[in-house]
Image (tube, helix red, strand yellow):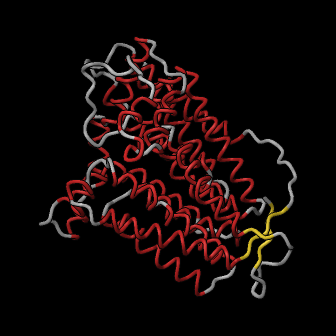
Amino acid sequence: MGMPLIWILVAISVALVVSGLRRPEGVYQYPFLAGATFLGFIAPQFPALVDDPFLPVGAMVRTILFTILCVSACGFGWRVTLPRAARPPWQFEERRLLVAAAVFSVIGGYFYVKVSHLPPEIKYSIFTGMPVVYLFFAKLLNYGFAIALVCGARRMSLAALAIIGFDTLFYAERILILGRRSEAVEFFFLVVLAWWFQKRRTPPRLLTAGFVLFGALALHSAGDYRAITTERDEAGWSDLLKIDLVENFAEVLEQGGPEVRNAVLRIGQVRDTHAYDLGLFHWNTLVFNYVPAQLVGVEIKERLTVSLDGQLGRDYEPPVGSTETGLSDAFASFAYLGALKFFLIGFAMRRIYDAAMAGSTVWQVVYPLMLAPAMLSITHHTQWPPSAFLHIALFLLPALAFARVRQPADFGAQAPVAMVPS
């Protein structure tokens, strides 16, 4: 029964991808990106696990069924639309927007430099302690880049160009040297969506689709890339050409991948113990991300979290560097109803996209910043979008409020103020 279900999963994922290719803007929308992620990252890890005798009985089929529900929920959530309430239009002063972008870029750049100067044994491992604080504030550079791109797409200026160039240097280091996949996705969509929202122009659909699908395929070779660029001093850039993406993909098809195996084991364990957390996973993750142990102490931080006993088996040891995918925490929260998490993500992304298309500068900045977290909700865990939005609410929205003005004016070549609907 496993293989027929896998083909159903592939068919639904392909349908989302093909549907996105039918419209110029479809490749920027969440269903296309979710379909590409399920198709390129999740589905290829299933076939080799179908007959694995070491997996719990029934856990494999249960996980595939749940995955089908999740990928379908992404599409259905996007299709549900509600009428937008009429609100007074927002207006922004370009100079203030660029000031906010510059401040974000300088602060974020400073903390990225702090991260880059960490010892290699810390820099290329899982961050804890002060490095987490550095990354928390380094994200501000992303906001500065997003604001500068929107301003530049409307009316390019020397200030916007300088900020864009400054921020691009940091993105290049994160993407080319460290091989960060989420930063690559974010950089690409920040650029193309700024152009799309302002000019309604897009690169050729096949080019964008090829980039996204190539990225999904290359996910399985990220480890090889990072080994060359960060871990082996004797390796040269020419060794990147030796990475065989097709061979690595074929290896995943033949042997399976650790991420889906982790998901199967955890889903099977939760199903057997009925240790559902009812969404408390999200509270624990928020505490981990936003409560600094340096200020409140490790003991108090641990007391704020809720113990989730029974979700992990005693012999459960996920490989270092692997994830459990968003499938795991979604099922661990509400069993099969956990697919509603992906429905809500799709629904929220549609609301943000529609507001951006209606001309809202706020959401034109926020939407591309939320795309990478929305995709990470599939490959990593579903807390990525809420955590990312909370960070945006804490830092980006106050900066936009600072740049907001109330008197109407044009945001053209002669006027420094933009009027946009909220």
In the displayed structure, 324 sits above or below 197; it is: above
Q: How many marks?
A: 0
| Residue 146 at x, y percent in the picture | 58, 67
> Residue at the location (69% across, 51% down)?
352
| Residue 86 at x, y percent in the picture | 87, 52
Task: From the viewer's side, name the closer residue of 280 and 327.
Answer: 280
Find the residue positioned furthest to the left. Answer: 234
Task: From the viewer's side, name the closer residue of 23 and 87.
Answer: 87
| Residue 253 at x, y percent in the picture | 32, 38
| Residue 203 at x, y percent in the picture | 58, 69
> Residue at the location (47% across, 38% down)?
287
Image position of 347 (left or right of 230): right
Q: Quadrant of the C terminus?
A: bottom right
Image position of 325 (left or right of 364): left
Q: Quadrant of the N terminus?
A: top left
In the displayed structure, 398 sits above or below 325; it is: below
Image position of 324 (left or right of 160): left
Image position of 33 (left or right of 108): right
> Residue at the location (48% across, 56% down)?
212
